[in-house]
Amino acid sequence: MIESVKGVNSLFSTNALSGVTSETSGSVSAAAAQGTGTQMSFAQVMGDMATDMVDRLKLSETKSFEAIQGKASTREVVDAVMNAEQTLQTAIAIRDKVVTAYLEVARMQI
């Protein structure tokens, strides 16, 4: 299931979003762009967030299997699972906002 989430990166076309920069995508990405001196596109920011989400979910699964084998403590597992849950909730909230914005644009009269 986690592997299928990686397909999110293919949904973003940098050609279609070339005019969108990090200034419109939030303070976190704007701070990241200022720190490196380069501008990141919205697609790059969303792709990075999806990759981070997949990595955290994989870490959570890995820690769970390590706990079953007796190699990880309960605290490590709980921390990893809570981290993954928070990341997943953030991704769901962003998805909901994007869908809502799309529906609002679709309802606009031209």
Image (spheres, rainbow, N blue to C red):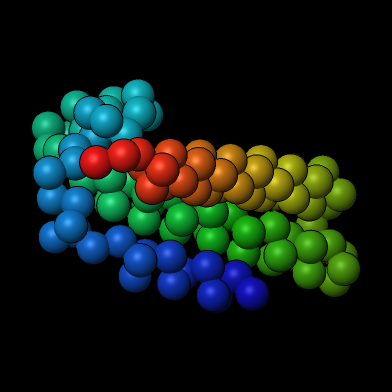
Q: Give above or below for 65 relative to 29.
A: below
Q: Is residue 82 left or right of residue 5?
A: right
Q: Residue at x 31, y 39 (%)?
A: 109
Residue 87 image offset from top left, x and y in percent: 60, 45
The foreground one among 13 and 66 is 13
Q: Is residue 34 left or right of residue 79?
A: left
Q: Is residue 3 left or right of residue 62?
A: left
Q: Give above or below for 14 relative to 106.
A: below
Number of numbered markers: 0
Q: Is residue 67 left or right of residue 39?
A: right
Q: Residue at x 29, y 26 (%)?
A: 31
Q: Give above or below for 59 relative to 37.
A: below
The foreground one among 64 and 16 is 16
Which of the 4 image quarters holds residue 39? Answer: top left
Q: Residue at x 46, y 56 (%)?
A: 50
Q: Give above or below for 61 relative to 74.
A: below
Tell me, yes or no, if residue 19 can be seen here: yes
The foreground one among 10 and 109 is 109
